[in-house]
Structure formats: C-alpha cells, structure tokens
Amino acid sequence: MEVINMSSIYNAGPVYSGIHTLLGLPYDKDAKDADVALYGMPFDISTTNRTGCRFGPEGIRQYGQCKPYHEELDINIFDDFKAVDTGDFAIPLSYVDRDMDAVENQLYELLEKGVKTIGVGGDHTLSYPELLALKRKFGNLDDDFSGSRMDAEKMVNNFTVTLTDENGNTLINHGTPFRLAIQHDCIDMDHAIQIGMRGGFGTLEDHDFALEHGMQIIFGNELHEMGMSACAKRIREVVGDTPVFVTFDIDFLDPAVAPGTGTPIVGGFTTAEALQILREGLTRLNIVAMDLVEVAPAYDPTGQTQVVANEILREFLSILSYNKKVGK
C-alpha cells in the first residue's frame, strides 16, 4: 500500500475531481497563517456591454492548477509560502452602491488578517471598492499608494458610455473605477500608470480627465512599438517603492487569445507579452494587492480564456512568492 501526501501535489497539475478552487489551492475561509488570500467576486451588474463575468471566478476554478516550480524566476512557489482560496465574497447583486460596500467591507476584513490579496472578478467596477478597502487599511493612500493597471479601454466599443449624470457626478460602472478612485483620493497619481489602453474614449473630456489628474498612460499602439521590456522599465520608474495595487483586465489580451470577455477589443496582446510585462515589471515591487477581472466564460466555449486567466493568476502568485523571498 502506498500513502500519498496530497498536500504536496494538490497544486501540481489539473484536478478533475473534488472541489474546484482558484489555482487548485486549499480552501480556507479564514486564511489562517496564509501569506496570500485569493477570493472571488461574482458581480457584473455594472457592465456596459455584455454581462456574464459574474461567472468568472467559477469558470476559472474549473481550470485551477499551479505547478510549483517557476523556471523563469527559478523558485518553488510554495517554499515557505502559503496561499489559499477563501471562496467568494457575498455580493447581493441588488443595488450597486450596496454591492460596492459589501466588497469593500469584506476585503477590509481580509486585509486585517495581514495577508496580501488577489481578487478574481467579476467586472472592473470591483477595483473601486477594493481601492477603498486598501485606503482604509493603509491610511491616506493619496500619499503612498500607486495603481498599476493593465487594461484595454472599455469606454467605447462601437457605442458611447455616459460617465457622469446630469449634475456631473461620476456614475458607477466598469468604465469608471479609477475615475472614482481618483476623486476619492485612493491613488497617488505621481505613481500611477495605465498600460495597453485602446479602443477610444467616450468623449475628449474622458481622455483629458485622466491626463489632467496626472495619470500616466501607455496606449496600446505605443506599447506595441516600445516593446515589453521597455514597458516594464517604465513601470518600475513610475511606481518606485510605494505600495502597489495591480489590476489586470483580461481584455488587455487580444480577443484571439482571450475571447471570453464582455468587452473584447482588437489590437491587444499575447499571453507571452503579458507574462513578460508582469515578470519584468512587478518583481521586487511592494505589491499589497492584485486583481484579475472581466473573464466571462460563456463567450468562450473552448475554455481557453479560463486557462489563460489561470496562468495570469499563477504569475501573480509567483511574483508575490518571489518578492517575499527577496524581502519585498
């Protein structure tokens, strides 16, 4: 009879039995003794194009695996490093403001446990309450917090999205989380950068708002021209040593690579290019939280987008493990 230590192989390959978890990690709602806590955010009632990314966390879990050895970083991810799936946040999907409060409060409770976090959406609106929770945890993030965003712009996709009401107040939807975060002093704009923006803006005012508030933007066409290594260098220069929140919209990738999203926009990037930017741009940074959003499994019956999302999450986890090993 052979006795197998399942704890040593739970993350080594695809698992088609048992309970599915993000990256095949152990489930622990309390995140006891964990370095990193992953959580799902099934929410998509603020999309302006196609719904369905409320099923993103569930879909990605179906492909969850995380092989421990990372050849590029030359580390075993789980050496002196514990990561867990804490399950999904309870989001009522009723009124948007209440849903935002629910996400903010549940993330704050998780941060109070002393873990770094990786959220899985859900639409990109969710980055706004995440930033509010991070501001509560780390104090006045206007002074010492930076947001690094890899995102394909979703304000226009053959239609126009209204970002403000008749009184000029910013509306809450998946095109406005960072506008809202800027208005609520959640981001240190001296250290904020958006990467891969494309698809146009609803109005010139939308474009001007970002630039006038100091947001540094590398548009998609610029990124194609400058290359991934130059982009990674730029990230490091902009962010510096400040605490970092990283948010990755799956539609940063070209629809040919990741069709399972609510707002596919052509002219995007490959998985190899995305992984290169993450690896070269984020190692040794002071990352406190990350998220991956906008995966909508229904639009990709092959499951390719969920597989890609799983690999992005594995890269997130590898970077956080590497950073711990080098004292970041």
Image (tube, grey):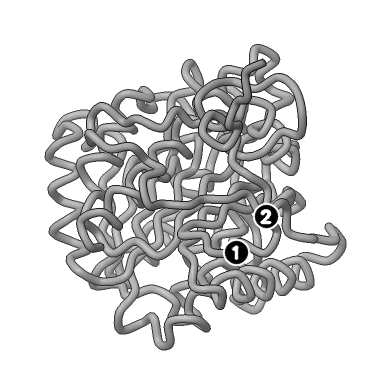
Question: Furthest-front residue in view?
Answer: 1
Q: Which mark is residue 28?
A: 2
Q: Quadrant of the C terminus?
A: bottom left
In this rendering, is residue 89 above or below 167? above
The answer to whether residue 48 is left or right of residue 196 is: right
The answer, for residue 276, to whether it is visible in the render is yes
Residue of label 1: 32
Q: Residue at x 44, y 40 (%)?
A: 152
The answer to whether residue 47 is left or right of residue 191 is: right
Instruction: Give the x, y percent position of residue 17.
Output: 75, 22
Q: Which mark is residue 256?
A: none
Label count reads 2
Q: Nearer the viewer, residue 274 or 151?
A: 274
Secondary structure under tag 2 reads loop
Cβ–Cβ under 8 Å for marks 2 and 1:
yes
- Circle 2: residue type: Asp
Q: Determine the CA span between mark 2 and mark 1.
A: 7 Å
Q: Quadrant of residue 213 in the image?
A: bottom left
Q: Nearer the viewer, residue 66 or 297?
A: 66
In this rendering, is residue 20 above or below 266? below
